[in-house]
DNA sequence: CAGTGAGCGAGCTTCCGCTTGACTT
């Protein structure tokens, strides 16, 4: 039996390390945290100095029992969780939970997985840093208090099952406020003038841009008029060197951004693929905020660059992080072996690996060098100048393998290239001058990746939570990912050619959106409620401020319980005041009056989401209600659209003895026919769909008869059925998996009963139940 | 799995950060 037990966080890491350490060491993984506050209540004894109540969750009990057994047999237990706040806490929880004696525990850390680094770590053990652990406890408890005290206020004041938190609520706020900026944005128009000149000494024409933008068409026309008889002279030709440096290696956030821009991957898709590459040993850990590369990686990069591109392309660089709150427990994301250009993976895996390989290699390559040329051209009749820019690449450097893309989808940049041969004093002949009408652009909406970037800039959230946060705010229906078609607008183009000024009006597309984050009514209303009642918590600087205090705790300068006490007193007072005094918030808007009944029509948030109310609640007559469609917004729904919602259900008449009833359900439009319900495809409109079409849908819907493999006369409640995941047993409404190795048709009643009685109690049924 | 919204009140919802499979009918 091994004398040493090493515990790391990740099983993939455990496997690698075991190889380096030899027979005396057994390496196990804790799979992250092993215990936490209980989920069902706040789990903190606030009166008793914020004493937390930690429990080992059900899915970790087996693991903890195993670790206990291994620890009992070992002489020394090496706690090798990550070198950051959470890692230190994991080590401490392990020590506490496994009841390890101080004399047997050694805490070691390494932030690269190489034999030298690990052996060095083993030679330099230390004790658990309790200050750092306390900083984590403060973080954990503060997040729990914020989440579990504010969320219930939302349940009472807005809608059940909503949530608020230090991270998610700021994410929603960013999206809501950006939408407001867009709504208030007034586009202004301006004109950019460019010109094409004939050059005496070259056949290639010279393209230039006027150094002034005009606001009105009159200004443009007067400018072009003054060009008709003007002479154009090259005033100066200036050449200067320029360079571009490569981007640093990937962190989680930059990988998500680049995979989104270059490969079109969602944030969660990127993480799933990266996880697989990591488990296969192709890349280093994918949840990191560090841009650092290990000495080993730099050596591998050097070899690869020298052999593939030559010595002149090599430029070893050390990058330092700029992001707030980075803890740098891991390396940057890089290929484990840089000479490995292609990996065995599916198409997406190959693409993501290729991106990581290129970014890593490029980060250690030389700057690209350019020569930039600026030419200004005098106009004899005006003081404005035309300006031409040229650029030639002297040395491509890192651009040989990688160029960073930007979020700017507007191709504003001129296509820079080689200029024709010209010198100062040359006279130019104007061939064409063109003024294009342009419009100032509204601020861009966030997509998943740009939201992650913004959160990281604010120091909010961690690499392991970016993807889950994005999914949470969508699950709560605070925001939606949507596309918007382009709109059209007229654009004027005014040209001057051969002494003639002409105007043309064309049409341009603008404002198309693809997979952008839009706030919903609920998101907007909850954000309004939070910014009004919990201003400090949703402040963009809140996280940065508490992080400073967590750092003080980690340094031993601040007591964690005191810190929490200082935070809690005013916070809790705010919670109580808000739940007593603030009004229920429904975002109610009076749309107008129903022309038929004269009743008021309101749009508001109800218990089940956005709805239309016909009539007032204070009157004798009970109001009528109808849910709004997902695409409709309280802000801009019209009376006509609202009244249309009351046209459901529609009875289209008899079909084989039953009425065809078209209605809207929780899962969208459907046809009710007798006892069966049939979904109406998205291509049809439930408000206008006709009888014949419904019959067609009914006929095309396969009957839901389940394939019964076996029944028992003695026990009619037990059935063996064929499902999409293979055969299973159904008994009294519950389903049971058939153990591997047994044939479904040959199961006896006794065996079925045994499977049913031995089945583990259902764990996750709650999450699948309809939310009621 | 298929409209609900008053009011009564049971009993439920909820956070962030660290890690992977188990699971779905």
Image: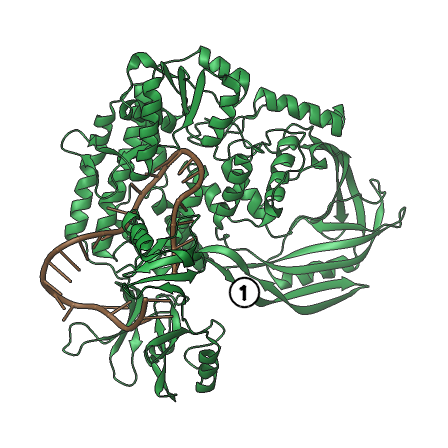
Chain colours: A green, B brown
Compared across the picture, whether A365 is left or right of A615 comes to right
The residue singled out by tag 1 in the image is: A485
The relative height of residue B9 versus residue A6 in the rendered view (above or below) is: below
Quarter of the image for residue A25 reads top left
User: x, y (%) of residue A654?
Assistant: 37, 89
The relative height of residue A269 versus residue A699 in the rendered view (above or below) is: above
Q: Nearer the viewer, residue A423 or A612?
A: A612
Residue at horizontal 51%, vertical 56%?
A515
The relative height of residue A364 versus residue A639 in the rendered view (above or below) is: above
User: x, y (%) of residue A575?
Assistant: 19, 45
Mark 1 belongs to chain: A
Residue A544 appears in the rendering = yes
Residue A549 appears in the rendering = no
Residue at horizontal 50%, vertical 14%?
A119
Secondary structure under tag 1 reads: loop
User: x, y (%) of residue A46?
Assistant: 17, 34
Residue at horizontal 55%, vertical 47%?
A260
Compared across the picture, whether A226 is left or right of A627 comes to right
User: x, y (%) of residue A632?
Assistant: 39, 68
Residue at horizontal 28%, vertical 86%?
A596
Q: Nearer the viewer, residue A122 or A747?
A: A747
């Amino acid at each position: 039996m091994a004398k040493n037990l090493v515990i790391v966080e990740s099983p993939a890491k455990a496997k690698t390390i075991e190889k380096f350490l030899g027979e005396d060491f057994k390496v196990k993984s804790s799979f992250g945290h092993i215990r936490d506050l209980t989920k069902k209540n706040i789990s903190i004894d606030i009166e008793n100095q914020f004493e937390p109540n930690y429990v080992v969750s059900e899915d970790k009990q087996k693991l903890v029992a195993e670790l206990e057994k291994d620890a009992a047999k070992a002489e020394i237990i090496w706690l090798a969780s990550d070198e950051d706040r959470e890692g230190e806490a994991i080590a401490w929880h392990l020590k506490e939970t496994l009841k390890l004696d101080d004399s047997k525990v050694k805490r070691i850390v390494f932030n690269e997985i190489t034999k030298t680094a690990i052996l060095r770590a083993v030679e330099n053990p230390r004790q658990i840093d309790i200050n750092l652990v306390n900083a984590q406890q403060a973080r954990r408890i503060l997040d729990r208090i914020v989440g579990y005290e504010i969320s219930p206020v939302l349940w009472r004041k807005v809608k059940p099952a909503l949530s608020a938190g230090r991270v998610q609520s700021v994410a929603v706020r960013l999206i809501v406020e950006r939408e407001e900026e867009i709504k208030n944005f007034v586009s202004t128009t301006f004109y950019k003038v460019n010109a094409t000149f004939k050059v005496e000494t070259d056949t290639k024409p010279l393209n230039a841009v006027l150094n002034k933008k005009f606001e009105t068409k009159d200004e443009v026309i007067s400018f072009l008029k003054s060009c008709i008889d003007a002479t154009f002279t090259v005033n100066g030709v200036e050449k200067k060197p320029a360079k571009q440096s490569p981007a640093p290696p990937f962190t989680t956030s930059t990988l998500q951004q680049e995979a989104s821009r270059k490969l079109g991957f969602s944030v969660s898709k990127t993480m799933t693929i990266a996880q697989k590459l990591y488990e296969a040993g192709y890349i280093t850990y994918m949840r990191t905020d560090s841009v650092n590369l290990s000495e080993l990686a730099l050596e591998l990069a050097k070899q690869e660059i020298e052999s593939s591109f030559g010595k002149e392309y090599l430029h070893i660089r050390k990058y330092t992080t700029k992001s707030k709150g980075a803890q740098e427990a891991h390396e940057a994301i890089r290929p484990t072996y840089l000479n490995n250009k292609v990996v065995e993976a599916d198409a997406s895996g190959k693409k993501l690996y290729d991106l990581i390989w290129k970014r890593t290699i490029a980060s250690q390559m030389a700057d690209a060098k350019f020569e930039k040329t600026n030419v200004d051209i005098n106009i004899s009749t005006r003081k404005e100048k035309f300006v031409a820019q040229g650029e030639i690449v002297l040395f491509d450097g890192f651009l040989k393998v990688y160029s960073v893309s930007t979020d700017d989808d507007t191709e504003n940049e001129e296509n820079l290239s080689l200029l024709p041969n010209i010198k100062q004093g040359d006279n130019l002949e104007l061939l064409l001058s063109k003024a294009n009408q342009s419009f100032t652009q509204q601020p861009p909406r966030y997509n998943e990746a740009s939201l992650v970037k913004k959160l990281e800039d604010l120091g909010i959230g961690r690499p392991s939570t970016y993807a889950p946060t994005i999914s949470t705010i969508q699950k709560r229906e605070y925001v939606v990912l949507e596309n918007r078609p382009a709109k059209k607008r007229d654009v004027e183009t005014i040209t001057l050619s051969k002494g003639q000024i002409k105007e043309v009006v064309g049409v341009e597309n603008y404002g198309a959106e693809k997979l952008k984050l839009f706030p919903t009514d609920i998101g907007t209303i909850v954000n309004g409620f939070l910014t009004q009642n919990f201003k400090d918590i949703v402040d963009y600087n809140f996280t940065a401020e508490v992080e400073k205090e967590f750092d003080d705790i980690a340094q031993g300068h601040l007591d964690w319980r005191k810190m929490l006490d200082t935070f809690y007193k005013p916070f809790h007072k705010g919670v109580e005041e808000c739940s007593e005094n603030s009004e229920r918030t429904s975002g109610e808007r009076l749309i107008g009056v129903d022309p038929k009944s004269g009743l008021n029509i309101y749009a508001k948030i109800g218990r089940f989401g956005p709805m239309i109310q016909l009539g007032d609640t204070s009157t004798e007559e009970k109001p009528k209600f109808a849910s709004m469609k997902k695409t409709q917004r309280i802000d801009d729904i019209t009376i006509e659209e609202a009244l249309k919602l009351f046209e459901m259900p529609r009875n289209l008449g008899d079909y084989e003895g039953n009425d065809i009833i078209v209605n809207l359900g929780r899962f969208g439009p459907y046809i009710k026919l007798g006892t069966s319900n049939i979904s109406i495809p998205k291509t049809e409109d439930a408000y206008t769909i006709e009888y014949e079409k419904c019959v067609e849908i009914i006929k095309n819907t396969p009957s839901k008869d389940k394939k019964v493999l076996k029944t028992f006369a003695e026990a009619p409640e037990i059935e063996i059925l064929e499902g999409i995941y293979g055969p299973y047993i159904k008994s009294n409404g519950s389903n049971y998996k058939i153990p591997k190795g047994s044939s479904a048709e040959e199961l006896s009643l006794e065996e079925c009963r045994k499977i049913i009685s031995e089945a583990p109690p259902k764990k996750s049924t709650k999450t699948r139940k309809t939310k009621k």
